[in-house]
Amino acid sequence: MNYKEMQDVLMKELRLYHYPVAVKFFYNEEELASFQEDAPEIHTPLKPMTFCQWELGARMQGQIVYSDIKGLGCANAKYSFGWKGQDDAEIKGHAKYVQDLDQAERFVKSKHQLWEGLLGIAVAPLGSIDGLFQPDTIHFYCDNMQAYHLAVDYMAATDTHPLRPNITMNSSACGGNVFTFIEQEFNMLPACSGSYNAGKTERGEINVIIPGSKFKATFQRLMDRIEAASSSITRPGDGFPGADICKNCPLIIFKKQ
C-alpha cells in the first residue's frame, strides 16, 4: 500500500478524528528543493507560530505545511530543533514547572535536541506525501484506546516490550517528535501546557509518535489483525473501538428482528 491507502485504512479502522501527521526534518538542500518543486501546494505560516500550530494545518485541514526558523515563534521548539541553544530565557521559561532554577537548567539540558544544520520542517497529512518524502516520524493525535491499539501493534511488530515513552516539560509535540527521530523509538505522551491550548488539544488527545522507519511494520501488524479477526483488540470481531460495554456481558446483546 502507498501512504494514501494506509491513511484511509487508519482513519476507517481506528476511527481517527485527525489525519496522521507525517513529519520531515530537512537537512539536505537538494532533497528540500525536490520537495518544494514536487509538492502540489505548500502552505507556510503567515506569522511566526508554534510547531504544534503548524500541525493544525496538517491534521485538521489536510494541508502540507512547511517552514524554516522564520515561521517558528516558540522558543521551546527552537531549542528542540537545534535552532537555539540553552540560555537564561529558556531556563526561566521553565521556572513555573520546577522547584528552582537549578532544577530548570538540569531539566532543559536533559531534553533531546536535533543536531545543527536543520533547514526546515514539513508537516503533512500522511496520505499526501507519496512521491514527496519519506517521513521521519508519524504523529497521531488520538484518544486513549486508539493510542493503546497503536502501542500494542508497535510492540508486536518490533518485538519491543515494555515501551518507555519520553515525557518532557513544555515540549510534547516538538520534543516528542525529536525524541522519536533521534532514538528511533515509539513515544506516547500527554499534551504539554503549551500544546494543550496553542495546539488545540482540549479534547484530551494523546500524542502517539512512531518513527518512520518502523511505521510500515506497525501498520502491517494492524493489517494482519484485520485479516485474522478485526482491527479491535478490546472486542475482536467488532470494528474499532468496539462495543463500549462490559466484556462478555450477557445482558447487552442485540439481535435482528
Image (cartoon, rainbow, N blue to C red):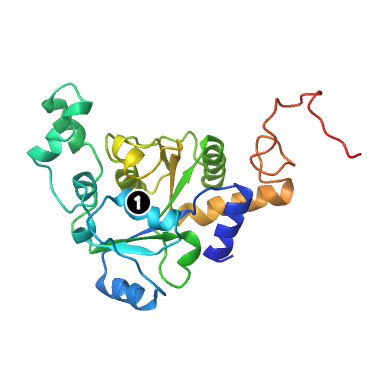
Of the pair 43 and 171, the residue shown nearer to us: 43
Of the pair 141 and 5, the residue shown nearer to us: 141
The residue located at (89%, 40%) in the rendering is 256
The residue located at (41%, 71%) in the rendering is 132
Please identify the residue farthest to the left as the structure is shown. Answer: 88
Report the amino acid beneath label 1. Answer: Phe
Against 186, residue 104 (above or below) is above
Against 99, residue 24 (above or below) is below
Q: Position of residue 185 (x, y in %)?
A: 40, 45
Against 160, residue 1 (above or below) is below
Q: Which SS class for mark 1? A: helix
The answer to whether one can see residue 45 in this image is yes
The residue located at (39%, 72%) in the rendering is 41
Q: Position of residue 7 (x, y in %)?
A: 55, 58
Instruction: Give left or right: position of 88 versus 164.
Output: left
The residue located at (32%, 36%) in the rendering is 192
Quarter that holds the C terminus: top right
Of the pair 257 and 187, the residue shown nearer to us: 257
Count of labels in the image: 1
Instruction: Give left or right: position of 251 versus 90.
Output: right
Please identify the residue farthest to the bottom as the structure is shown. Answer: 37
Categorize mark 1 by other alpha carbons within 10 Å: few (<14), some (14-19), many (20+): many
Question: Dot 1 corresponds to which residue?
Answer: 181
